[in-house]
C-alpha cells in the first residue's frame, strides 16, 4: 500500500504474473459494505463496530483492539462544544489515524469525530466494493450530522481524505475551514489515469503480508481507481475557483506518493485566506515569498531522521503503535537489496525509498514537531 503508485501503475507487464493473491480471506471481499447513513453518530459507531467484528480478517489475537483501532470514534470535550471537526482518513488507513489529534483538539474544546470510509477496516479486498459516490455520501452525511450539533464546523483529511473533504467544502457553505494533512491533490504518477482501465483487467496492484492492524498493505486496482476519482474531483474544483476559507495544510518535501511542489503552488494560488498556513517539512523552497508558509527542516540527525514521510505528520512521538517507541516498525521501506540491522538503535527513519549505503531507513511514522503542529492548528482556527 505504501509503494509509489507511479511504480505500481507503470509496471503493467508484471501485473498478470505477480499480483496474484494467496488463498486467504483477506483477499476475498466481504458480502456487503456497512451502512453509513444512520440518523445518529452513536448508532453509526455501534453498527460499524458490529460489522467489523463480523467481517474483519483479523491479524492478531486481540480482536477487541483491532476493532477499536478501525472503527469510527468520537471525542467530546469536558464542556458543551460549540466547534466541531470531522476527520476523514486516507486510502487503506483507518479512523484511528486521527487519534492523537482528536484527543488534543477535544481538550481544546472541540467535538471531534473520525469516520470509516466504506471498504476499510475489514480486509484489503473490501476496497473492491465501494464506488466513489459511497465515499462522498459518507462524508456528506456525517458532515450534516455534525453541523446539526455545533455552531462552527471544520473538516479535516489525510491524503485521499483531504481530497474528499476539500471537494465537499467547495459545495457546503456550513464548512468554516479545513485541516489538510498530506492532501492527495497531485499524485506523483503520470499513470494514475490508467487505474480505472486496469481495474477491469487485474484485481490487484500490490500484494503484501498483512501485519499492520491499522493499515492495509495490499492494494486492489479498484482502490487506485477510487483515489483517481477523488483526484479528478478535487482538481476540477481547484482549477475552477479559489477557496477563500481558512486552511491548514502540511506536506513533506520528500513525500513518495504526491507532488509536493504542485501542492505548495496550489496553496499559494488557490487557498487565498490570509489566516491560512502551510507547514512544509524539508528544505526552504526556492524563491519563497508567502509569509503564510512555514518551512521546518526534516533532517534531524540527533533523532536519526533523514526526512519526513507521507504519513508521519499525524502521530505524536508518544503514540503506542506508530510512535518513537511504538510497537509497530515499518522496516520494508523500498530497500530490498539491504538487510535491516540487528540493533534497532542504529536504524534511521525517512520517507519510502530513501537510500544511503551507510544507513538502513525504516519508515518515519511519528512527527517530531507534533506539538508545534497543534499550535499551528490553534493559530489557523483562532483558538
Image: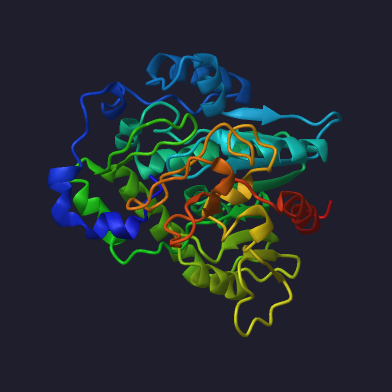
Write the residue at 76% across / 41% down.
105
Residue 123 falls in image quadrant: top left
Write the residue at 53% across / 34% down.
328
Q: Position of residue 219 (x, y in %)?
A: 32, 42
Q: Residue furthest bottom?
A: 287
Q: Residue furthest right?
A: 79
Q: Nearer the viewer, residue 106 or 164?
A: 106
Taking the image as shown, residue 105 lies to the left or right of residue 223, namely: right
How many numbered dots are placed on residues in this image?
0
Q: Is residue 42 visible?
A: yes
Q: Position of residue 263 (x, y in %)?
A: 53, 67
Taking the image as shown, residue 105 lies to the left or right of residue 339, namely: right
Q: Nearer the viewer, residue 362 or 289?
A: 362
Q: Is residue 240 visible?
A: no
Residue 380 falls in image quadrant: bottom right
Quarter of the figure with the N terminus: top left
Colour style of the rendered protein structure: rainbow
Write the residue at 76% across / 65% down.
275
Q: Position of residue 159 (x, y in %)?
A: 50, 51
Q: Nearer the viewer, residue 246 or 37?
A: 246
Q: Position of residue 14 (x, y in %)?
A: 16, 52
Amino acid at each position: 500500500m505504501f509503494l509509489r503508485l507511479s511504480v505500481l501503475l507503470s509496471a503493467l507487464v508484471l501485473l498478470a504474473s505477480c499480483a496474484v493473491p494467496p488463498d486467504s480471506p483477506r483477499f476475498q471481499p466481504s458480502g456487503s459494505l456497512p451502512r453509513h447513513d444512520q440518523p445518529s453518530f452513536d448508532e453509526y459507531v455501534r453498527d460499524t463496530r458490529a460489522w467489523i467484528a463480523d467481517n474483519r480478517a483479523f491479524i492478531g489475537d486481540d480482536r477487541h483492539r483491532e476493532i477499536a483501532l478501525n472503527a469510527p470514534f468520537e471525542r467530546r470535550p469536558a464542556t458543551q462544544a460549540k466547534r466541531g471537526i470531522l476527520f476523514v482518513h486516507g486510502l487503506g488507513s483507518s479512523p484511528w489515524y486521527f487519534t492523537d489529534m482528536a484527543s488534543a483538539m477535544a481538550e481544546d474544546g472541540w467535538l471531534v469525530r473520525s469516520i470509516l470510509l466504506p471498504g476499510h477496516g475489514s480486509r484489503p479486498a473490501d476496497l473492491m466494493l465501494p464506488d466513489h459516490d459511497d465515499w462522498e455520501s459518507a462524508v456528506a452525511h456525517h458532515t450534516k450530522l455534525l453541523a446539526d450539533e455545533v455552531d462552527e464546523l471544520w473538516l479535516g483529511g489525510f491524503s485521499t481524505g483531504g481530497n474528499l473533504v476539500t471537494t465537499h467544502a467547495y459545495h457546503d457553505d456550513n464548512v468554516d475551514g479545513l485541516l489538510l494533512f498530506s492532501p492527495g491533490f497531485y499524485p506523483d504518477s503520470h499513470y494514475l489515469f490508467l487505474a480505472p482501465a486496469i481495474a477491469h483487467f487485474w484485481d490487484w496492484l500490490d500484494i503484501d503480508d498483512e501485519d499492520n492492524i491499522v493499515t492495509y498493505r495490499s492494494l486492489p486496482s479498484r482502490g487506485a481507481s477510487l483515489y483517481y476519482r477523488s483526484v479528478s474531483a478535487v482538481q476540477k474544483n481547484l482549477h475552477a475557483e479559489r477557496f477563500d476559507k481558512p486552511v491548514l495544510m502540511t506536506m513533506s518535501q520528500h513525500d513518495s506518493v504526491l507532488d509536493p511542489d504542485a501542492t505548495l503552488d496550489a496553496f499559494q494560488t488557490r487557498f487565498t485566506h490570509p489566516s491560512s498556513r502551510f507547514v512544509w517539512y524539508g528544505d526552504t523552497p526556492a524563491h519563497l515569498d508567502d509569509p503564510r508558509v512555514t518551512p521546518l527542516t526534516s533532517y534531524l540527525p540527533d533523532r536519526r531522521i533523514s526526512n519526513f514521510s507521507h504519513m508521519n505528520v499525524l502521530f505524536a512521538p508518544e503514540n503506542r503503535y506508530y510512535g518513537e517507541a511504538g510497537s509497530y516498525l515499518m522496516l520494508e521501506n523500498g530497500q530490498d537489496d539491504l538487510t535491516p540491522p540487528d540493533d534497532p538503535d542504529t536504524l534511521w527513519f525517512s520517507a519510502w525509498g530513501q537510500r544511503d549505503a551507510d544507513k538502513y531507513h525504516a519508515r518515519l511514522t511519528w512527527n517530531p514537531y507534533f506539538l508545534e503542529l497543534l499550535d499551528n492548528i490553534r493559530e489557523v482556527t483562532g483558538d
